[in-house]
Image: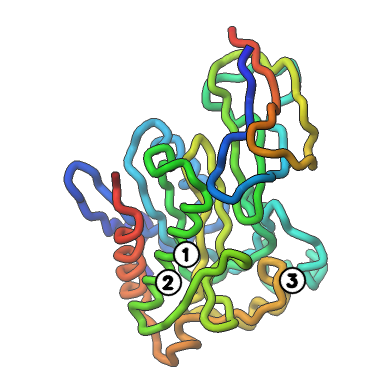
Amino acid sequence: MIQLVVPDLGEGVRKVEVVAWHFTVGSSVTPDDDIVELVTDKSSFCISAPVGGVLVKIYVNEGQEVSVGTVLADIEPV
Amino acid sequence: MFSAGFLLGQVRGEEAVQTIDLGCISYGDALLRQKEQVRIVAAGGADVLFVCEHPLTITLGRKTKQENIFFPEAELVRLGYSIVKADRGGDVTLHMPGQLVAYPIIGLKRNGRDIISYLHQLEQAVVDFLESFGIVAKGDDERRGVWIGRDKVASIGIGVSRWVTFHGVAINVTNDLSAFRVIRPCGLNVRMTSVEATTGIKIDRALAVSRLTQSFQKVFVPL
């Protein structure tokens, strides 16, 4: 199982908001697909799939604020 | 006006840092060009700076609050504004001819993976550009963008996909500032200014593009 985690986006960025999931649970994803979009004040940041597989679980809803290191989703590699 | 695809590239060592002037292009078409280039840079291609102008267009960032748009959409359309939802950070902003828009497509994987540092670099490139016209300006960590005194001259909003940047910064150069009356730019109660309004001299577009290229190439040196 591969976990999607909020990366360290730079000094001073502690909280980000999840604004859009581009896939739903059960969707097949390919490497480099943008899975989820996060925003800070002036930037939006897409987390892409590190591997191909199936998005099996989403832990955080759109509109929620999360910290660096938070697990956002699980991908089952195929 | 330059024709689309005009190239102001320079070669440094083995890496080419190109500025591609897209001329006056719709916001949507410019975004398509950026996303195409994001794929290329993510695959290891060279960083690129797109420079362009847009027709009169209001763009809504991910943080836009409706209260920052003062007119109903139908009225804005009647007044000649297009309205586009943008997948960038920030609130509402406005583009129009005479405003130079810079869209750096930069691979942050090879530049430290630091969005805040990148925002500082963007602001610094604009500060250097303005300095070339004798204008003292500065960035602001609390209110992102570039400021001349208390007036705002450039607005910033970026996107990052696969650690490659897109969107960027819009600099008021010769544009009609009264067009901003329909929005609260970036959600702030500020007065907008421009290079021309500050210096009182007519600014040649080709010169502005050339100086912007120099400023960006100074700040974004390929690693």
Say how the picture is coloured.
rainbow
Crowding near the residue tagged with mark 1, few <14, some 14–19, many ≥20 C-alpha atoms within 10 Å: many
Q: Between B206 and A48, which is closer to the camera in this rendering?
A: A48
Earlier in the chain: of badge 3 and badge 1, it is: 3
Q: Are marks 2 and 1 in contact (CB under 8 Å)?
A: yes
Task: Give the structural element (helix, strand or loop) at label 2.
Answer: helix
Q: Which residue matches tag 1?
A: B123
Earlier in the chain: of badge 2 and badge 3, it is: 3
Q: Position of residue B101 (x, y in %)?
A: 48, 63
Q: Position of residue B90 (x, y in %)?
A: 65, 57
In this picture, is B81 found above or below B44?
below
Residue A57 appears anywhere in the view: yes
Q: Which residue matches tag 3?
A: B78
Q: Which residue matches tag 2?
A: B127
- Name the kind of residue labelled 2 in the image: Val
Residue at x-position 43% and y-position 58%:
B121
Classify residue B21 by image quadrant. Answer: bottom left
Q: Position of residue B113 (x, y in %)?
A: 47, 41
The CA span between labels 2 and 1 is: 6 Å
Q: Position of residue B88 (x, y in %)?
A: 61, 51
Q: Is residue B59 left or right of residue B23?
A: right
Residue at the extreme bottom of the image, as rendered? B200
Q: Quadrant of the C terminus of chain B?
A: top left
Q: Is residue B109 left or right of residue B11?
A: right
